[in-house]
């Protein structure tokens, strides 16, 4: 109900087709600001196997048209990596896929959340075929000027344990499940 | 797509020794129309209705206004694109983006045209193979208000 059907016309990948697009579905299981425990560390519930079409779709959504970003065949010959150039913020799709709708970090899906800013470090681009695991540490929660901030540190590693990227992710959240519910039922 | 052109791999980043602080990077522009935001929602897998569902956004007023807005991560992407389009997320001569630290200062309303531009703010001298620069990037909406700023770290070839 929450995500309009018109988005279906823009689906470009099997992952987008299969992903749960109803943002509020299962919201009762989302971790909340009130429940999050600083210091808790765990792997996110899903892994992300990187595919060309994931990368190309993110690149296109950012306005990229250069064939180095959107044409795998061309990029295979001309790009420095032999793969599509990867937008530096592509990690967003990896995180949202891996975290899913329950468990540690699922507050990233909170209705009513506001985004104050983010910090992403990139060691090297994700490679096509790599299986990415996201490890999450709940870093900090505090109240400032009446706003409830929650921060988690995400580490993205491939199947060989190589650290590809990190994301220090902060959001301003509704504090309690009842507060979240007010947005769900708005 | 014609791939028979024997041009060398690209893009190519400037060399650390040749670049000066204050060097400006070309501006980028993107219209945050609702279809563009919808596409970003799918590509990022962030389907928060504050970005895609006008009726819900009007009722919830997450940002104090009755309309959908662009994703913060979309703003961050526009900020990062200033550097990645100029020099490449990785370059053919050994350059690469090392970090993007972004702060968002104003929600982006549907229909706004965002223009982002940046300049080399600081050179970090750490020795051969370890030098990098910090690029300051700023994005503004159609009315000229700053919607986000970022520091982008980039490893440059010597």
Image (cartoon, rainbow, N blue to C red):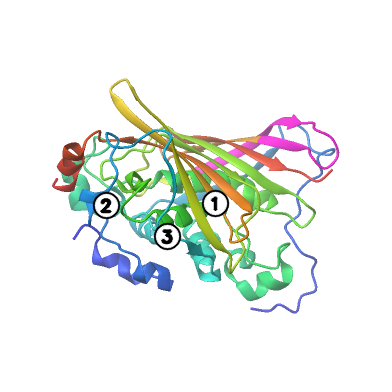
The chain ID associated with circle 3 is A
Q: Dot 2 lies on which element? A: helix
Asked if residue A144 lies left or right of residue A12, the reply is left
Quarter occupied by residue B122: top right
Q: Marks 2/1: CA distance? A: 27 Å
Q: Where in the figure is residue A58, as x and y percent of width and height?
A: 49, 60
Q: Are there few (<14), some (14-19), or many (20+) residues within 10 Å of tag 1?
A: many
The residue where tag 2 is placed is: B49
Prevailing secondary structure of the magenta residues:
strand
Asked if residue A186 lies left or right of residue B10, the reply is left
Residue B62 seen anywhere in this rendered image of the structure: yes
Badge 3 vs badge 1, beta-carbon distance below 8 Å: no
Q: Where in the figure is residue B62, as x and y percent of width and height?
A: 25, 39
Residue drawn at the location 33% of the way across and 44% of the way down: A107
In this rendered view, identify the residue nearer to me: B46 or A48.
A48
Residue drawn at the location 57% of the way across and 41% of the way down: B100
Q: Dot 3 lies on which element? A: loop
The residue where tag 1 is placed is: A156
Q: Are marks 3 and 2 on the same chain?
A: no
The residue where tag 3 is placed is: A46
Q: Dot 1 lies on which element? A: strand
Q: Which stretch is magenta? A: B115-134
Is residue A39 magenta-colored?
no
């Amino acid at each position: 109900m929450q995500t309009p059907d018109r988005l279906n016309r823009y689906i470009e990948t099997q992952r987008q087709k299969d992903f749960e697009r109803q943002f509020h579905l299962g919201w009762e299981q989302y971790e909340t600001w009130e429940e999050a425990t600083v210091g808790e560390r765990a792997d996110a519930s899903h892994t992300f196997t990187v595919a060309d079409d994931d990368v190309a779709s993110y690149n296109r959504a950012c306005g990229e048209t250069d064939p180095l970003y959107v044409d795998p065949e061309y990029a295979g010959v001309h790009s420095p990596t032999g793969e599509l150039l990867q937008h530096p913020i592509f990690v967003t799709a990896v995180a949202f896929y891996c975290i899913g709708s329950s468990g540690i970090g699922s507050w990233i899906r909170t209705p009513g959340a506001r985004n104050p800013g983010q910090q992403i470090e990139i060691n090297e681009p994700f490679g096509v075929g790599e299986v990415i695991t996201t490890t999450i540490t709940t870093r900090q929660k505090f109240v400032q000027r009446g706003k409830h901030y929650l921060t988690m540190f995400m580490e993205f590693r491939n199947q060989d344990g190589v650290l590809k990227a990190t994301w220090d992710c902060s959001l301003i959240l509704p504090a309690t499940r009842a507060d979240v519910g007010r947005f769900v039922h708005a | 797509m014609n791939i028979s052109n024997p041009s060398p791999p690209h893009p190519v980043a400037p060399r650390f020794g040749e670049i000066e602080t204050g060097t400006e990077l070309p501006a980028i522009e993107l219209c945050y129309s609702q279809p563009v935001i919808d596409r970003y929602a799918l590509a990022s897998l962030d389907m928060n209705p504050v970005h895609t569902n006008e009726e819900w956004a009007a009722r919830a007023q997450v940002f104090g206004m009755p309309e959908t807005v662009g994703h913060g991560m979309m703003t961050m992407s526009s900020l990062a694109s200033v550097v990645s389009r100029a020099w490449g997320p990785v370059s053919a001569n050994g350059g690469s983006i090392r970090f993007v630290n972004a702060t968002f200062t104003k929600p982006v309303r549907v229909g706004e045209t965002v223009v982002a531009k940046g300049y080399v703010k600081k050179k970090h001298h750490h020795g051969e193979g370890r030098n990098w620069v910090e690029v300051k990037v700023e994005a503004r909406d159609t009315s000229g208000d700053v919607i986000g700023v970022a520091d982008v770290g980039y490893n440059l070839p010597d």
